[in-house]
Amino acid sequence: MTDVVIVAHQERREATALARAAVAWLEEHGHTAFMPRVDADALGLGELASDRPASSAGLALCIGGDGTVLRIVELLDGAEVPVIAVNLGLLAYLTEVEPPAMTAALRRYFDGDCSVENRMLLHVEVLRAGSTEPSGTWRALNEAVLEKEESGHTVRLLVNIDDAPFMSYAADGMIIATPTGSTAYSLSARGPVISPQHRAMLLTPVSPHQLFDRSLVLSPDETVSIEVAGHRGVVLTVDGTSVASLGAGDTVRCHPAIECASFVCFGRRRFHQVLRAKFGLADR
């Protein structure tokens, strides 16, 4: 018997029907299911509501788009719980299963007819000015972003790599992305696309006001530190959630996390073919 945590998009009506279908299949096959209370209440599935941590489950079923996938990864808090992601999104780079195939995917998982793909997570921490101890730590599947608080102005960010000065940027912000996150915000800032099987960090400036405006692909054994210089405030966002306001002298430090996010795959998933389909790339 496996305990399965179900996390679903809270504003999609079809998520309720899919969650009910998943629960029926799981119970019929001797498994149990629960949902975070906020999801269960939003979808009218109060009978599934639980205060159990998602990390206590043996399997996670994610019903939604990429944003819902980011949320389940956050809820798992680094635990090695495999995720089956069912697509209710638009671009949906992170989802593997279309809704009609959900119960078949559950069957294949419990039959062992699948594989698990590990994705690098980013360890993110904030050090306040003058402190050597982090005031907060987070993990990101996609990216950490330092962005200006005030529109119409750039902010100054001092970048160090492995404690060695690299350069000072005047920009709207800075993105530190994982390979998975290379197709998210970094891509819209003209960063390169990196296969998610790599372990690397991608440093992409946002609208830099200088001649050097290129992204950097860094090795997984390097650490990036970004210090806020000047008087203009900066917001730190981790996977789309604002987590801290930063001022002069505050530093964000990033390096690959020890933990990984684990996604269940059915058949061989070629990343370049997913990219081709999502962008509608055609042969010349």
Image (spheres, helix red, strand yellow):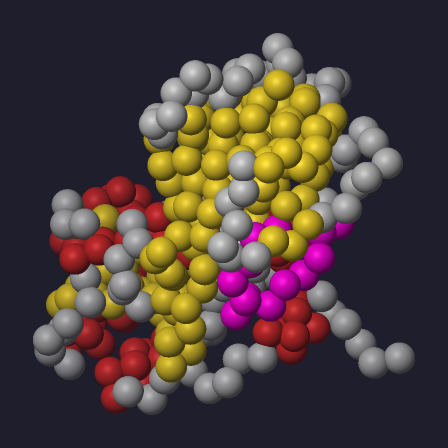
55 magenta-colored? no
Q: Is residue 226 visible?
A: yes
Quarter that holds the C terminus: bottom right
Q: Is residue 18 visible?
A: no
Q: In this orientation, which residue lies closer to the viewer: 180 or 86?
A: 180
Query: Would you say the magenta stretch is mainly helix, strand or loop?
Result: loop
User: Residue drawn 45% across and 60% down?
Assistant: 120
Outermost residue to the top: 231
Looking at the image, residue 197 sits to the left or right of residue 204; the answer is left
Magenta-colored stretch includes residue 198: yes
Compare residues 38 and 165 and report the one nearer the observer: 165
Image quadrant in which the N terminus is located: bottom left
Q: Is residue 16 left or right of residue 119?
A: left
The residue under the point 60% across, 37% down is: 164
**Residue drawn at (43%, 30%), measured in percent from left and top?**
126
In the image, residue 200 sits, relative to residue 83, either above or below, namely above
Figure quadrant of residue 103: bottom left
Q: Position of residue 213 (x, y in %)?
A: 79, 41
Q: Residue at 65% x, 75% y: name it.
A: 272
Q: Quadrant of residue 167?
A: top right
- Count all numbered tags in the image, as a single digit: 0
Q: Is residue 113 above or below residue 42?
A: below
Stretch of the chain drawn in magenta? 190-202
On screen, residue 35 above or below 199? above
In this view of the protein, which residue sits in the foreground, 251 or 103?
Answer: 251
Q: Position of residue 51 (x, y in %)?
A: 15, 45
Judged left or right of residue 153, residue 149 is left
Position above or below: 264 against 163 = below
Residue 152, percent across and down? 74, 18
Q: Position of residue 223 (x, y in %)?
A: 51, 45
